[in-house]
Image (tube, helix red, strand yellow):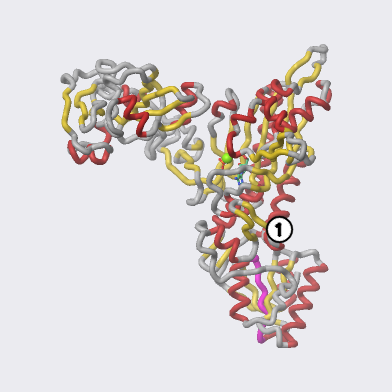
Amino acid sequence: MKQSQLLIPTLREAPADAEAVSHKLMLRAGLIRQLASGVYTYLPLGFRVLKKVQEIVREEMDRAGAQELLMPAMQPAELWKESGRYDVYGPELVRLKDRHDREFALGPTHEEVITSLVADEISSYRQLPLTLYQIQTKFRDERRPRFGLLRGREFLMKDAYSFGRSWEELDETYRAMYEAYTRIFTRVGLDFRAVQADAGAIGGEGETHEFMALAEIGEDTIVVSENGTYAANLEKAEMFWEPPAGSGEEAPPMNRVHTPGAHSIDQLREHFGLEASAFIKTMLYLVDDRPVAVVVRGDREVNETKVQNALGGERIELADDAAVRRLTGAEVGFAGPAGLEGVKVLVDREAAAMPSAIAGANETDYHVENVKPDRDFAADLVGDYRNAAEGDLSPDGSGPLKFYRGIEVGHVFKLGTKYSEKLGAAYLDDSGRRRTAIMGCYGIGISRILSAVVEQNYDENGIRWPEEIAPAAVHIVPASAKDAAQMELALELYERFRAAGVDVLLDDRDERAGVKFKDADLLGIPHRIVVGREAAEKRVEFKKRSDADKETLTADEAFDRIAKRN
Ligand code: ATP
Ligand code: MG
């Protein structure tokens, strides 16, 4: 590749609306361009990286025994109605009509299409187990497309689906996929953790793991024990729990206290001069439109996923101000479990074990002291309804929990029969009985990986691509295109690399050396060979993008460093 002929529109400054480092750098390095919010073009260098990631994913999927196919993005709405997801999926599903007014969706995922295919094509136990995958463009009209390729509305995904005859067979495939994912994310150069995730209403009994690239910009919080044996998404994370001594102690009777304007835990701490853990927080929700109060200790956060799972609900939303007024008879910030009527009350086990606490009075500007769980209010359910907190002990006894931010780059999921039942993916077993196939699904955000890798690999001058997915292995930069000896040696090396099958980029542009070096740092190709003043002596300067050190080598040595690496 000769830079003079390639479309690499580098920018000195990133557009103002790019917030994430990876987004800025990918725009500046001329890898991507935005067409519409969350919709991007991959320019030639960006496309090279995308293809390298795809190749790694393909190799590992094939190695794990999965077969590649390609399904349509355009999917009849009937299929989505059959699975029951046409309405549930909501506005994220891109819907359209054809000229005959027939409804279609642009696939955000392909459970429906693959399951109906398997329903049609598979009939005997002899044809199973089967794992099929594709690498394909997905469409999701995300509420907040942002951070470049991290959250797009049109993006590239690898999605795989397995069909088996038993849960044991699913366990095996799941393990094989998990291992393939581990190899993939290692090969693309990511620092990642596989974490337990919430299977939620969709999954039921299904086990599920998310693969998280560690990065501050990540939208997920992951919870990891000190020695790493326990790792979970905050949504799912549990904590060691033992009821404290003394929860049964007597408490004086409840006492109403005037707390004007104190509607947050911080304001209450100030008012009473007490720690947040002396209070209980009462949060009001609507779960499938039914009012629910969730009570946690004042220093804790409600875990909405745990609440939803406890109630088996499909949708959970925080009650708005009007609903709070209607349910409590007070302004927001004064809700409490004592005297609250017509609302289901879920009490976190830690709050339930408090000897007494200060809670809202369900009256504007008032709180109540000495509220004693059980004595002063009844819980409909007691359980784990709070987020884990840093310092909580791991449920598996492996020490205190620490928090990290993560970008979800992959997801493996035991689906069971949710789709196969609805869409009729069944087979005849060896005694001729009809059985429903047991499914798993496995996704990787191919385009998201590019951003995640950049989030983990950059410095103030630009990107530092890991070798396996870099747009090229080596960047040859003659300091002056006008210097015949330099250009001659640069071209000679370039041809040698090409002949040896090494991905090479030659900066043959007639630009000042400073401009070329800046661009080279920005593009982040892992090895750089600068052909400068010593070109006539066949000596060059060799540098790794990740190191500050430069070495002077003969052209032959520099060639060998690259061609004979590993
Ligand atoms: P998220 O919680 O980030 O929205 P998800 O749970 O909706 O992700 P899945 O449905 O499991 O994601 O999709 C499989 C993979 O596709 C994800 O692990 C992620 O890497 C990728 N992905 C999902 N949504 C997007 C998006 N909007 N842009 C880019 N990649 C995405
Ligand atoms: Mg999503």
Looking at the rendered structure, the secondary structure element under dot 1 is helix
Residue furthest to the front: 100
Quadrant the N terminus occupies: bottom right
Q: Residue at x 21, y 33 (%)?
A: 365
Q: Name the residue: 46% across, 45% down.
A: 404
Q: Amino acid at mark 1?
A: Phe
Left or right of 245, for residue 123: right
Q: Quadrant of the C terminus?
A: bottom right
> Where residue 247 appears, x then y in whole percent?
26, 21
Q: Nearer the viewer, residue 112 or 562?
A: 112
In x, y percent, where is residue 393? 40, 34
Instruction: Tell me the residue at 21%/29% (across/down).
Output: 367
How many numbered marks does the figure carry?
A: 1
Residue under pointer 1: 47
In the image, taking residue 316 as reference, residue 380 lies left or right, namely left
Q: Examine the structure image and report whether residue 453 is included in the region drawn in magenta.
A: no
Bounds of the magenta segment? 525-533
